[in-house]
């Protein structure tokens, strides 16, 4: 019996260790030498060696913020992987921005395990302008409800965001997904392939260059261990006139109507501030330097913004 308990405990420890490989992170792509492949930390690859023609490349042509982004070039070989840590518990939210020049193509898929072995597609293929025949439109070909069609703007940065709820275990996980602030996969959708096969875990995202017409840029990654509404459509939120500014440790919030609720989350997904009264300024002098998500409710409309202290 002792031996069996030991094996159970060892298995549990191994699973927890696997689930903790990658912690929440942010990446504005500013800390890498321009023109060089990015490998290490949460950036890896599909076992192709991590060099040029394999890993994502730091690039200074376009940037969503700062002066750099990550490039998947049209070489037909680059196969970069964003490691999301093989998560099997909790709620995980990811947001990043994407830029696809006019007429160019983009592609990624969601993997169930990293490092990549034979490949375990959760959502098999997300095509942007597939085969160069449909600029500004895309399709998800292997997910519940597939084919799932969507649109995106060319020659400008747009947001890609998702939330994966694994609170009831990976086999019962659900997710939602948005592109350019349009909800593509609704909340509560099973996190499986089209035939209902669940993944081993939330493993990672594979960004692949399928041919010489592939060219897309990635920036402003935020990965958090919580639900902070970063994936919801914000069509109505822009009409609230919401503005935020941080100066001398004072966060100032303004909108066309009363701001009825404010919550602030750190990059671990922990709520560090909450107020249900009309709030126009918050003293953040006691907060550690870093990135925060500020979630507000304005006359029943919710939205979130990122601030950096």
Image (cartoon, rainbow, N blue to C red):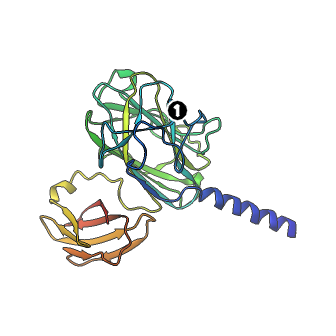
- Could you tell me residue 238's position as x and y percent? 19, 54
The residue to which callout 1 is attached is 54
Q: Quick check: can you spot residue 147?
A: no
**Quadrant location of residue 4?**
bottom right
- Could you tell me residue 65's position as x and y percent? 29, 49
Q: Going by the picture, which residue comes out furthest to the front?
A: 33
Q: Is residue 85 left or right of residue 157?
A: right
| Image position of 194 with respect to 164: above or below | above
Helix, strand or loop under label 1: loop
- Could you tell me residue 165's position as x and y percent? 49, 57
Q: Residues within 10 Å of mark 1 (few under 14, many from 20)?
A: many
Please name whichever residue, 60 or 91, is drawn nearer the observer in this view of the structure. 60
| Image position of 154 with respect to 25: above or below | above
- Could you tell me residue 118's position as x and y percent? 64, 35
Please name whichever residue, 8 or 145, is drawn nearer the observer in this view of the structure. 8
**Quadrant location of residue 297?**
bottom left
At x 21% / y 75%, what residue is drawn?
281
At x 46% / y 32%, what residue is drawn?
141
Q: Quick check: can you spot residue 67?
A: yes
| Quadrant into which the C terminus falls | bottom left
| Image position of 295 with respect to 280: above or below | above
At x 42% / y 61%, what residue is drawn?
227
At x 45% / y 38%, what residue is drawn?
36
Q: Is residue 115 left or right of residue 205?
A: right
């Amino acid at each position: 019996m002792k031996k069996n308990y030991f094996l159970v405990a060892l298995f549990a420890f191994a699973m927890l260790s696997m689930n903790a490989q990658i912690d929440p992170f942010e990446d504005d792509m500013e800390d890498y030498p321009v023109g060089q492949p990015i490998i290490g930390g949460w950036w890896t690859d599909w076992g192709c060696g991590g060099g040029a023609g394999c890993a994502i490349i730091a690039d200074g042509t376009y940037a969503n913020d700062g002066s750099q982004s990550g490039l998947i070039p049209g070489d037909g070989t680059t196969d970069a992987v964003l490691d999301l840590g093989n998560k099997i518990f909790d709620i995980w939210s990811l947001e990043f921005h994407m830029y696809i020049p006019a007429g160019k193509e983009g592609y990624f898929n969601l993997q169930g395990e990293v490092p990549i072995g034979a490949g375990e597609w959760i959502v098999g293929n997300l095509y942007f302008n597939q085969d160069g025949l449909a600029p500004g439109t895309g399709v998800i070909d292997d997910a519940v409800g597939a084919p799932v069609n969507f649109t995106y703007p060319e020659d400008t940065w747009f947001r890609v965001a998702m939330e994966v709820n694994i609170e009831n275990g990976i086999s019962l996980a659900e997710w939602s997904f948005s592109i350019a602030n349009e909800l593509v996969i609704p909340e509560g959708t099973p996190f499986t392939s089209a035939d209902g096969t669940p993944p081993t875990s939330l493993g990672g995202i594979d960004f692949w260059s399928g041919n010489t017409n592939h060219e897309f840029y990635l920036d402003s990654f935020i990965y958090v261990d919580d639900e902070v509404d970063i994936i919801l459509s914000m069509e109505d939120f822009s009409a609230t006139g919401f503005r935020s500014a941080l100066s001398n440790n004072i966060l100032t919030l303004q909108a066309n109507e009363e701001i009825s609720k404010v919550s602030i989350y750190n990059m671990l997904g922990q709520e560090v501030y909450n107020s249900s009264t009309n709030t126009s300024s918050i003293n953040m002098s006691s907060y550690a330097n870093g990135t925060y998500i500020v979630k507000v409710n304005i006359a029943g409309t919710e939205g979130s913004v990122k601030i950096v202290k």
